[in-house]
Image (tube, rainbow, N blue to C red):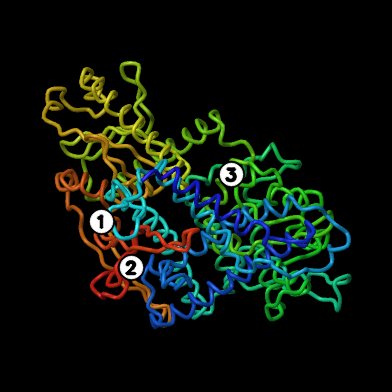
């Protein structure tokens, strides 16, 4: 079946059926308010369902399954995990906003919602977004429509590649989640011992006062670092400080109207998250009235929000105003869809008020967020990518050298701290473990989320693997230079095994191979060279505040490290466990003619979350 024709017809039919039911007779402001109200209300419903499902785990938290708890979606018994539902919700917001931005600011309907015929299920436009995503999977991810069954089914041509993408994403989430939970466990222990926990953001928004919309003002106060919100703020700061983005947190975002930085924007984000929590506490029961919608949309006075955040951070109002503008969704349609609202959740309503999408603020990835800010500020151009890459390379090599020096089990292993130029080629990574020579290309890449991004990402990895192979051939012609670097006899190098690797700054891509070139990541490399005691699993009892670990010895000396390197670098234990416990399920999706078609999607096996023999994490 022709996928382009199929999805083109489905999208066209869908638009004809629902377009007139979206925001009929509403002004631009009312349409924006309704969009954010529906989004925030649906996010609240998803969170509540996830919380109810989590209680069944009786306090035992398996990393990765926290965000993979299945929830019924309401269509034909479908079940999707929490992450997928939230992603679908947030990715659909631009589809609604694009239609809201087209509306006129008609005075006679600016203060009321004409509810007649309005589509109130926010996930309606997620159908359009999902159809578009399905088509992009066909276009970029090598999927196809299998019509050799009773119901046609969207299916991957390369299921192994699809599983590696999913498992890589789950591993990345697991590593970030374990950081948060470990910090939480440590905080609880410090509190039990009577220690004071300093707050991540010393002053923040703690309340709101006033008996009418005209005189409501945010209240500012000091908070304990032990509070749930402050622990989340601190966890995100820790994640950024330990990531490849750390050198860029204080860089000036020169394209903005003021001298902003990602660190400042992150501090504003934390206070904004606290403000949203305060506003949500006062939400009325859901109904389609203007007052209820305005409340659920987190509609607030822009000037008062700027005042409050300025007081919290001791910054000028003009600087915070520039931050709010920077964090606002772009009314330029091209930018609205390319950037989305994950890093830009504020939507202006006129000149003096704004609404806020809470899901990105509450659950979005801090790494993707900062990458989005850097991209908007112009850091995604070629020159900036090169500079970012060079900083990452230098920092990574230095870290590996320091880890090897402190590892008593690796007595003869050596890593070159600076890049090496041999035969006109720059070698990013050069390391010797016993009689194994590791030649690597280091890449600092933005983590892909869309099918087209994954396609381009894979092309970059393919190109990097070609570079490694080319450089290896040059090194083989210059053994004497390599011998001098490692202070060994040139003749012995012919007996060495050679491992070619591409090292990336995130988990997506680890597990791939291009010919004999292994794709690995900085996290597993640091773990491997740091210690042979590999923590391959973690399990938390959040009620008892206890941690169980499962570890294994990867090696006892240089020779054993050499033998185990390729296996661990290409398939870390956590990734291996995730791949082995991934299952394919069939979901159902509505067609415009009233029938259904199926789509394949990956889920973690139920036993992976409940089997006490399985612990997972990575440290």
Between marks 3 and 1 in the image, the one whose residue lies nearer the viewer: 3
Residue beneath disc 2: 538
**How far is mark 3 from mark 2, CA to CA?**
37 Å
Choose top left, top right, bottom left or bottom right for residue 445: top left
Give the image location of residue 120, x and y in percent.
64, 69
Between marks 2 and 1 in the image, the one whose residue lies nearer the viewer: 1
Reply above or below: 427 against 397: above
Reply above or below: 338 against 544: above
Give the image location of residue 47, x and y in percent.
53, 73
**Left-right relation of 366 to 224:** left
Q: Name the residue: 36% across, 57% down.
A: 171
Give the image location of residue 63, x and y in percent.
38, 67
Residue beneath disc 3: 338
Instruction: Give the camera-side residue of 293 and 459.
Output: 293
Tag 2 or tag 3, which sits nearer the N-term? 3
Tag 1 or tag 2, which sits nearer the N-term? 2
Instruction: Please say if the residues under marks 2 and 1 sit with CB atoms less than 8 Å apart.
Output: no
Choose top left, top right, bottom left or bottom right for residue 66: bottom left
Q: Residue furthest front?
A: 593
Residue beneath disc 1: 576
In which quadrant of the rendered image does the C terminus lie? Answer: bottom left
Instruction: Give the camera-side residue of 364 and 221.
Output: 364
Quick one: label 2, few (<14), some, or many (20+) residues within 10 Å? many
Instruction: Please say if the residues under marks 3 and 1 sit with CB atoms less than 8 Å apart.
Output: no
Mark 1 lies on a secondary structure that is helix
């Amino acid at each position: 079946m022709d996928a382009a024709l199929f999805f083109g017809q489905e999208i066209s039919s869908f638009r004809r059926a629902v377009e007139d039911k979206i925001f009929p007779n509403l002004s631009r402001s009312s349409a924006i308010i309704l969009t954010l109200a529906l989004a925030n209300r649906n996010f609240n419903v998803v969170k509540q369902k996830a919380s109810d499902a989590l209680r069944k785990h009786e306090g035992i938290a398996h990393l990765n399954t926290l965000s993979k708890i299945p929830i019924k979606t309401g269509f034909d018994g479908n079940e999707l995990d929490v992450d997928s539902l939230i992603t679908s919700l947030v990715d659909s917001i631009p589809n609604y906003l694009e239609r809201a931005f087209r509306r006129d600011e008609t005075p006679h309907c600016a203060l009321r919602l004409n509810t007649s015929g309005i589509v109130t299920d926010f996930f309606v436009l997620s159908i359009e977004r999902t159809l578009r995503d399905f088509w992009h999977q066909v276009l970029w991810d090598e999927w196809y429509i299998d019509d050799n069954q009773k119901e046609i089914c969207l299916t991957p041509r390369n299921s192994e590649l699809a599983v590696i993408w999913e498992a890589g994403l789950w591993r990345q989430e697991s590593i970030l989640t374990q950081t948060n939970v470990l910090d939480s466990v440590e905080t609880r222990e410090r509190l039990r011992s009577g220690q004071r926990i300093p707050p991540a953001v010393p002053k923040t928004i703690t309340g709101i006062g006033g008996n009418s919309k005209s005189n409501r003002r945010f209240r500012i106060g000091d908070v304990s670092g032990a509070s749930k919100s402050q622990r989340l703020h601190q966890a995100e700061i820790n994640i950024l400080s330990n990531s490849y983005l750390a050198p860029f947190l204080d860089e000036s975002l020169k394209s903005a109207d003021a001298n902003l930085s990602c660190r400042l924007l992150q501090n504003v984000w934390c206070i904004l998250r606290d403000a949203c929590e305060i506003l949500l506490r006062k939400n009325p029961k859901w109904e389609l009235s203007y007052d209820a919608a305005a409340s659920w949309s987190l509609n607030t006075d822009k000037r008062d929000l700027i005042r409050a955040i300025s007081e919290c951070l001791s910054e000028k109002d003009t600087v915070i105003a520039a931050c709010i503008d920077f964090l606002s969704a772009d009314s330029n349609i091209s930018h609205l869809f390319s950037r989305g609202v994950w890093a830009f959740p504020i939507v202006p309503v006129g000149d003096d008020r704004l609404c806020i999408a809470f899901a990105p603020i509450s659950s979005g990835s801090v790494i993707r967020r900062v990458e989005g800010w850097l991209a908007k500020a112009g850091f995604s151009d070629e020159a900036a990518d090169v500079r970012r890459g060079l900083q990452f390379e230098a920092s990574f090599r230095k870290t590996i050298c320091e880890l090897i020096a402190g590892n008593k089990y690796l007595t003869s292993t050596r890593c070159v701290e600076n890049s090496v130029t041999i035969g006109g080629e720059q070698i990013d990574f050069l390391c010797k473990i016993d009689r194994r020579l590791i030649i690597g290309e280091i890449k600092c890449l933005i983590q892909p989320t869309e099918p087209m991004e994954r396609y381009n990402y894979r092309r970059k990895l393919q190109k990097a693997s070609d570079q490694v192979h080319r450089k290896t051939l040059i090194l083989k012609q210059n053994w004497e230079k390599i011998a001098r670097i490692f202070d060994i006899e040139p003749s012995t190098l012919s007996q060495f095994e050679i491992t070619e690797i591409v090292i990336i700054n995130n988990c997506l891509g680890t597990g791939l191979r291009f010919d004999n070139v292994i794709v690995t990541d900085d996290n597993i490399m640091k773990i491997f060279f740091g210690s042979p005691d590999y923590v391959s699993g973690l399990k938390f009892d959040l009620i008892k505040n206890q941690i169980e670990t499962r570890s294994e010895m990867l090696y006892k000396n240089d020779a054993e490290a050499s033998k185990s390197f390729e296996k661990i670098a290409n398939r870390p234990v956590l990734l291996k466990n995730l791949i082995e416990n991934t299952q394919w399920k069939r979901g159902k999706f509505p067609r415009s003619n009233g029938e259904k078609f199926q789509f394949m999607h990956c889920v973690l096996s139920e036993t992976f979350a409940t089997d006490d023999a399985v612990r997972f994490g990575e440290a």
